[in-house]
Amino acid sequence: MGQVPLSKQKSPYLLIGNGRLAKHFKYYLELQTIPYHHWWRNSGFDLDKLLSQSSKILVLISDDAIEPFVKTHRSKAINATWIHCSGSLETPLAEGAHPLMTFGDRLYDLHTYQSMPFVTTSGRKCFKELFPELINPSQAISQEKKTLYHAWASMAGNFSSMLWTEYFQRLEQEFQIDRNLAAPYMNQIFKNISSNQNPMTGPLVRGDNQTIEAHLSSLNKDTFKSIYSAFTGVFRQRESLKEIT
């Protein structure tokens, strides 16, 4: 169904922005045949007219720009529900619904979109009130824990992505090993993480301190040495706390 013409009646949604999240959300609505309007900077569309024709406005732009945008344009859509998808922002200017998902360049299939959870704020509108057409699982958390929740989501997703991207590059550039050879290793690690509460293996778990010191020595001039040291320190601290309790 896609974007409805300006001449048509009110559309359920107006998507603001043209980044990855906006493109994925747009495609999700298309797969569900849910009509929408779409505006982004330099789109050439009349924003004021689109605002007046939309029941819900999804502000899918950078976190720092959300509140200024809503403050600037809210008077043009007083009766509309304003929604943002930031994981950490809490503002009285808009409802929040954070998709617990990573959004790459490639679009996903309908099942993937429908299975991604949304996290809302306790005491605000729930997911079903914001998106009655969608069947995604959802969970509400307290406002006080939103930033911590998003910090952990960012660490788990972005930091692991950084490590794996670097690892694949190092395999090819430093060791002349085809990155595809490491795919089974990566896939099994993530399978173990999803099915086992204690998925870690290797010298840290075995307490092979000589191997760990050798690793650190080999990373002596490597920018990732500090990461190895930091994770080793966290692991050892947690293990020592277990012994105390």
Image (spheres, grey):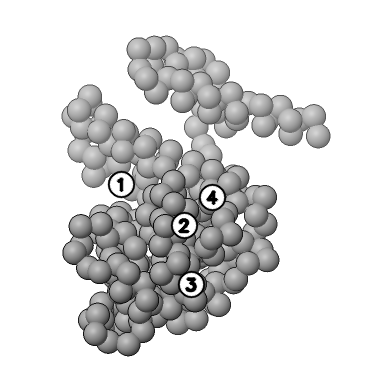
Q: Earlier in the sequence, mark 2 or mark 4?
A: 2
Q: Earlier in the sequence, mark 3 or mark 2?
A: 2
Q: CA distance from mark 1 to mark 4?
A: 33 Å
Amino acid, disc 3: Ile
Amino acid, disc 2: Lys
Q: Secondary structure at mark 2?
A: helix
Q: Nearer the viewer, mark 2 or mark 4?
A: 2
Q: CA distance from mark 3 to mark 2?
A: 11 Å
Q: Nearer the viewer, mark 1 or mark 3?
A: 3
Q: Secondary structure at mark 4?
A: loop
Q: CA distance from mark 1 to mark 3?
A: 51 Å
- Above-or-below relation of 158 to 92: above
Q: CA distance from mark 4 to mark 3?
A: 24 Å
Q: In the image, is 152 to the left or to the right of 23? A: right
In the image, residue 79 lies at what x, y percent?
A: 49, 76
Residue at the disc numbered 3: 78
Question: Residue 94 shows which numbered tag?
Answer: none
Tell me what residue is drawn at x 54 percent, y 72 percent. Answer: 127
Query: How many numbered dots are placed on residues in this image?
Result: 4
Amino acid, disc 1: Ala
Residue at the disc numbered 2: 71
In the image, residue 13 lies at what x, y percent?
A: 38, 75
Q: Are marks 3 and 2 in contact (CB under 8 Å)?
A: no
- The residue closer to the viewer here, 66 or 180, is 66
In the image, residue 33 lies at what x, y percent?
A: 31, 83
Residue at the disc numbered 1: 183
Amino acid, disc 4: Ser
Q: Are marks 4 and 3 in contact (CB under 8 Å)?
A: no
Q: CA distance from mark 1 to mark 2?
A: 47 Å
Q: Earlier in the sequence, mark 1 or mark 4?
A: 4
